[in-house]
Image: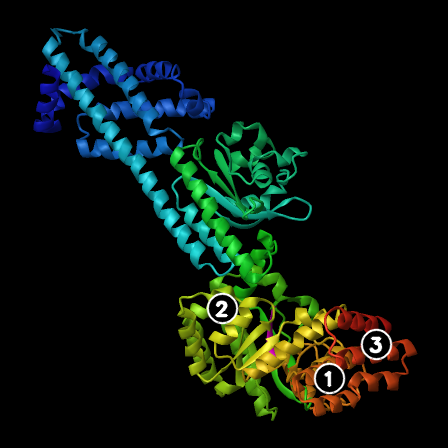
Amino acid sequence: MAAAREVGRSSESGPRADAPLLALVQARLAPLAESCVERFYASLVAGPDAPDVLGRLDDGELAHLKMRQAEHLRSLLDPELDDAALVQSSRAAGRIHAMVGVETDWYASAVLVYQRVLDDALGDVLGATVPGETVPGETAARARAIVGRRVVLDMKGALLGYREIDAEQSRVLQRVNAVAANAETVADLARGVLDAVADLDGIADGFFGRPDDDGLFQFEVAVGPGAEAFISGASRAGARPITVTSTSESGLGPAGRAWRTGVVQRSDAYLADPSTAPWHELGRRFHWRSSAAVPLVDDSGTARALLSLYASWPGYFAYSSRVSFLALLQQTVSQALDRLEAQSGTASGILVFAERNAYLDMLERGDVVMLYQPIVDLATGCLVKLEALARLRSGQASTSSAVRDDELVNPAEFLPAFGDAELFRLFEIGLAQALGALRCWLDLGVDTGVAINLPTTASSDGRYHDAVASALATHGIAPGQLTLELLETAALDGGSGWHGAALDELRALGVRLAQDDLGSGYSSLLRLRTVEFDEVKIDQGIVRDAERSPRGALTFIQPLTSLAHALGLRVTVEGLETDGLVEAAVFLGADCGQGYAIARPLASPHVPAWAGRPALEIDRERPRTRLGALAAHLAWESRLAALGSSRGLHDQAIEEPCGLARYLASHREPGDAVRAHRELHAAVAGGAAGELHTSAWERLTGLLGNDS
């Protein structure tokens, strides 16, 4: 009770009143700080949790820890250090405890051990005789109370440090959630998540990557002071690449295990972990003391990508709060990756870090080249507009306007490197070039327009409206001569309605809107009901399948064309790479066509000469190609079906020869093909459908040649 009263008295009178006695304790106990720390650790190692924590430290780290603890004990006894300063100092110590994986319950138990060691030491030094005087028992008890109070303040500060660590993790998770919800590209997701995680105190470096076809991990996005140096220097340092196979030593580390299991894997003592041995030298160089590999998994638990995190403290990821943090990080980012890959319809390709940075550097320098592919009216063969297609210029920028094909990088290669900011910058540069080129063509008497892709991120970004308005005004272009092609994106089909205002603002400028890649997904069909488009472009993936499976592709293109026309939209068919595909698009009723069979992408100076060429010639009565003839027959079937119950007109239409009959006659096809065509007509005339109609089609297409 006396000790309790003394603690209360010290608290009321404050540290100044305690200063003389604390100075006495400091004078006698401070010289013994190192021995007190050694006694503390000797008592500590007997506990059940000590090996997990202390075992992560090498001899040098443990010696450094003991030295710092001795310094902290001297501060604890310093009468010049007031309560607020002591708590602040202890706060930093508590943060370090959390970062080396010391749980709060074990820390509290360790404080009790520490207090007993100090109490025993106080008994020894206060019971001794100072020359000329002896410390009375009441004074010794009061000294113990003062030191006990300082230990309590020390623990309070440390627990505040723990709380700060937990609060920081919560804030980072909030940022990760926001990134995951709003990212429009995998690049944005990876960069945003790593930037957020890198703000955690103690994180050294972070990477996003995936294995290539050979099972070697390719790091694609990196953050941290050592990240870029690690990626560029790993091969020079002779370090083994990380793999996913369990049969290789380089596949036994946390990353390989995480990829195979789909479960977060840790290395709590990186430089002492046998499974990380191939990379110990790099770990020492970049001060990695622990690591965590977080697999981003799909619904089945299969890894699709990996977050590799490295910390400057051993045991960093072992702290229970951090374990929960990693689990939530995995769940949130995995779901976002699934959303983005489902939105694009395919898994995003691997783009290694060096290539990604090279593409970002090209964009930053403005090394963008726009090529222009003509889009023609299939009824007249005349030029309607040109689609502006972005390329990046590799190598040294040339002073010549001519650029070789081998100097250009295609979008399929560089777009995975771009996030929201880069896509907007690319759009700005491309739009300025396209409208500048259009201004030149118009001045030369070429009456045409341009089309340019509108990134999916534009649907919620007002900067695009401002960029379009400014560019139109700068180049003196009428808004109706610009078409913005909206790429497939599931984000437009959300129920929030926010996209409507963004697109309406663009439409209000007077530009035309086109739905690109119609038929590439169900969402693009739904969008025709909710967005006021002027035209649609049928996905070239469907068109290219026509050579392999004519009936399947052609019967898909025709209803899409009819649907668009019913909605008052013009239809452009992309990917017309053969004369047969061009003819098929004509007979199926498309308005416009685009593809290599019409023209390859042109440099801006070559457009006027191309526009002055003879018009595209299509004989709408007599197809010259196999695909054109099959499309003509399909169109005949469609007209027949449209006549419905009008028997007289129906019978009259049956007697009329279809384009396929004229093709067979002019090409002197074998008699088997002619007979198969008659059987197909008979099946249609008799109202046959299903299997009989399908088998007749397959027999006919099998007999025809492939002169597309």
Three-letter residue code for mark 2: Arg
Q: How many marks?
A: 3
Give the numbered dot on residue 435: none
Left or right of 294 on screen, residue 126: left
Viewer can see residue 180: yes
Q: In the rendered image, which quarter is residue 637 located in?
A: bottom right
Q: Residues within 10 Å of mark 3 (few under 14, many from 20)?
A: few
Q: In the rendered image, which quarter is residue 520 located in?
A: bottom right
Which residue shows up at 55% across the image and 41% down it?
A: 262
- Label 3 secondary element: loop
Read off the residue under disc 2: 425
- Please identify, in this view, whether the residue under mark 3 or under mark 2 is nearer the observer: 3
Which residue shows up at 23% across the image and 8% down it?
A: 124
Viewer can see residue 487: no
Three-letter residue code for mark 1: Trp
Q: Residues within 10 Å of mark 1 (few under 14, many from 20)?
A: many
Give the numbered dot on residue 707: 3
Cβ atoms at labels 3 and 2 below 8 Å apart: no
Q: Main secondary structure of the magenta part?
A: strand
- Label 1 secondary element: helix
Left or right of 679 on screen, residue 264: left
Which residue shows up at 14% across the image and 13% down it?
A: 141
Write down the region rendered in magenta. 387-391
Distance between the alpha carbons at the discs numbered 1 and 3: 21 Å
Q: Compare residues 130 and 87 and report the one nearer the observer.
A: 87
> Considering only vertical position in the picture, is 524 above or below 615?
above
Which mark sits nearer the N-terminus, 1 or 3? 1
Q: Position of residue 327 (x, y in %)?
A: 45, 41
> Considering only vertical position in the picture, is 449 above or below 409?
below
Cβ atoms at labels 2 and 1 below 8 Å apart: no
Name the image quarter holding the C terminus. bottom right
Distance between the alpha carbons at the discs numbered 3 and 2: 44 Å
